[in-house]
């Protein structure tokens, strides 16, 4: 049995600094988004900015500190149990998709309807608590799901996210502001791909961030694209203060005490996002195990849910999650210290109201090359850590996540255009049938198909990859069973269903029809002037046809077994 050797696994190593800067920049981006979006969209400006600085950020600090400290402790436990010194803690922070979705589709609509920033904040707490409960109770079944899911299915989703939302997004940002980001990128490539030690043993990540920051301060803003100045520092200095977390259980309970029709409709957003967070965290745990760190599925997901629940009860509207990127942090040489340090630093800046001040000192562009590198490592791992024959399964699982990134770009372009809305360009409504027929080609692309495949992409990536992996292994009945799961998810709206109003794409949870029939929420229709609705029933039927074909071939293959040699000869190879 492995012996306990605590001396071999120190609380902090030099390479933890590299991991810290990457994870910190990732967390800082989310924190900067909160005042930037909650201000104009949720009325949290002026006196109402207290909801951001006195409630949301301190609540986020509680959840981030709890999670980071737990996952660091978990890494120490695994190191002690296995006698290893190379265990890397799971990365943790605010869930970016949930942050955006809850602002745009929960808090923003409440503020637009009521004109009350407090009402928007309270509904955000309700949404956060709902997500946390789903994450916590999902821990009880996640292990069962993980044991029955091919690794290719779990890792291909992460690879797709890494390609689009990490690698491509940050690559574009680097080339958008090259005078600040290119030098850090070059230093990161030297440090991490060539694995060359820097003079005096300085961590490559620290040197890269320092040099990018220096470029940002020395170069004029019209050249660098980054505005760093004493005037900006002075303006951000005014937001400083000391804000202790405040228990907000009464505010959460106030939403439950209200009429059900005021909050029940938002379950169509909360339930899918909660389930997405469970599956996303499950995939990240599998990614860590593929890197050599086998953490407990139950405890990892339960702690994730507890962190989100703590966020809601202490004022934050935004769920936390196990981050994508463990293989990258491990390859950096980070261990457990980077997680602890991230939790402490994030807590400090949240409790002192200095989030924007940090952004005024260190340009985000200086740190994003580290995150870009993490995305590259994640993508490579999806192919390296799965059986070689399952590479096509990984590949097919990339498409929905890449489509999700493309959909985000398209949606943002329509918002910025100031011209015709996506709702106008994308579809037309058949007034007699209430359907909308989406056949618009935009620059040669079926935008409708792009949105259909990306809605619920975390599920779609995993299911398509699992189907292909089982087909490669000739396990037709399992492929058919996964197809039935896909049909059910498409039918209820966890995949492929959506609604478009103006330039906003939202989820459409089809089970909301049931609530409408009993009068709990207003029934959604595709009436002229209202949102355009697409329910994924045709896709559900398609998946049922999948299952029928796979089950039929399962019966056929059992009755007439074929050798691999015979199949190769028949295929002409």
Image: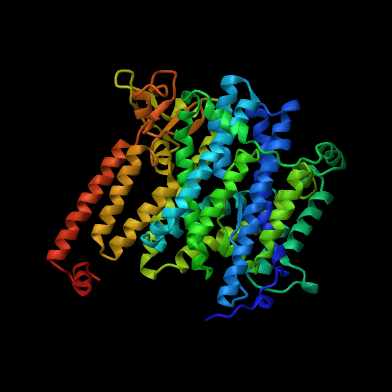
Q: Residue at x 46, y 25 (%)?
A: 424
Residue 330, position in %: x, y? 60, 67
Q: How is the image coloured?
A: rainbow
Res 293 → quadrant? bottom right
Q: Residue at x 86, y 39 (%)?
A: 234
> Is 435 rendered above or below residue 305?
above
Res 152 → quadrant? bottom left
Q: Nearer the viewer, residue 332 or 350?
A: 350
Residue 265, position in %: x, y? 46, 28
Q: Residue at x 50, y 44 (%)?
A: 133
Residue 195, position in %: x, y? 66, 73
* In-image side of 543 versus 195 (left or right): left
> Is 308 rendered above or below residue 77?
above
Is residue 178 something that shows in the picture? Answer: no
* In-image side of 102 versus 342 (left or right): left
> Is 434 rendered above or below residue 153?
above
Res 187 → quadrant? bottom right
Image quarter of the C terminus: bottom left
Residue at the limit of the structure toward the left, as seen here:
559
Q: Residue at x 16, y 68 (%)?
A: 561
* In-image side of 441 versus 40 (left or right): left
């Amino acid at each position: 049995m492995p012996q306990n050797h605590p001396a071999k696994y120190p609380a902090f190593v030099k390479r933890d600094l590299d991991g810290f800067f990457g994870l910190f920049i990732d967390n800082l981006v989310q924190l900067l988004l909160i005042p930037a979006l909650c201000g104009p969209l949720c009325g949290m400006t002026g006196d109402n900015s207290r909801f951001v600085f006195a409630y949301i950020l301190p609540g986020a600090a509680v959840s981030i500190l709890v999670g980071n400290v737990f996952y660091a402790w978990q890494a120490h436990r695994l190191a002690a149990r296995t006698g290893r010194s190379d265990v890397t803690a799971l990365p943790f922070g605010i869930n970016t998709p949930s942050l955006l979705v809850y602002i745009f589709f929960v808090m923003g609509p409440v503020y637009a309807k009521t004109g009350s920033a407090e009402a928007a904040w309270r509904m955000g707490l309700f949404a956060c608590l709902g997500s946390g409960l789903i994450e916590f109770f999902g821990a009880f079944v996640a292990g069962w799901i993980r044991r029955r899911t091919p690794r290719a299915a779990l890792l291909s989703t992460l690879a797709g996210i890494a390609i689009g939302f990490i690698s491509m997004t940050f690559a574009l940002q680097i080339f958008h502001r090259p005078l600040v980001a290119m030098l850090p990128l070059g230093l990161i490539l030297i440090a991490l791909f060539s694995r060359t030690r820097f003079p005096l043993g300085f961590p490559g990540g620290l040197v890269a961030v320092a040099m990018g920051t220096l470029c940002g301060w020395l170069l004029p803003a019209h050249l660098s694209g980054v505005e760093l100045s004493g005037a900006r520092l002075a303006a951000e200095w005014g937001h400083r203060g000391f804000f202790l977390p405040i228990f907000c259980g009464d505010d959460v309970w106030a939403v439950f005490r209200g009429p059900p029709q005021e909050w029940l409709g938002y379950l169509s957003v909360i339930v899918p996002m909660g389930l997405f967070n469970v599956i996303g965290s499950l995939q990240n745990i599998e990614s860590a195990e593929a890197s050599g760190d086998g953490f407990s599925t139950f405890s990892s997901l339960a702690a994730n849910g507890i962190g989100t629940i703590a966020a809601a009860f202490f004022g934050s509207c935004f769920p936390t999650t196990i981050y994508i990127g463990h293989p990258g942090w491990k390859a950096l040489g980070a261990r457990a210290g980077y997680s602890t340090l991230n939790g402490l630093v994030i807590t400090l800046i949240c409790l002192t109201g200095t989030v924007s001040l940090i952004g005024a000192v260190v340009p985000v562009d200086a740190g994003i090359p580290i995150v870009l590198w993490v995305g590259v490592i994640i993508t490579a791992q999806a192919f390296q850590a799965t059986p070689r024959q399952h590479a096509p399964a990984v590949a097919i699982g990339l498409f929905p996540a890449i489509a999700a990134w493309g959909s985000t770009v398209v949606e943002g372009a329509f918002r910025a255009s100031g011209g015709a809305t996506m709702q106008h360009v994308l579809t037309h409504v058949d007034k007699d049938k209430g359907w909308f027929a989406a056949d618009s080609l935009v620059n040669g692309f079926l935008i409708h198909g792009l949105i259909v495949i990306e809605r619920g992409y975390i599920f779609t990536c995993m299911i398509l990859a699992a189907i292909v992996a089982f087909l490669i292994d000739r396990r037709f009945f399992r492929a058919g069973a996964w197809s039935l799961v896909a049909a059910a998810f498409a039918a209820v709206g966890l995949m492929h269903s959506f609604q478009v109003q103006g330039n906003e794409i939202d989820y459409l949870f089809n089970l909301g029809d049931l609530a409408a029939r009993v009068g709990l929420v207003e029934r959604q229709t595709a009436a002229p002037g209202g949102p355009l609705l697409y329910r994924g029933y045709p896709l559900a039927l398609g998946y049922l046809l999948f299952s029928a074909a796979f089950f039929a071939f399962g019966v056929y293959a059992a009755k007439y077994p074929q050798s691999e040699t015979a199949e190769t000869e028949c295929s002409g190879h």
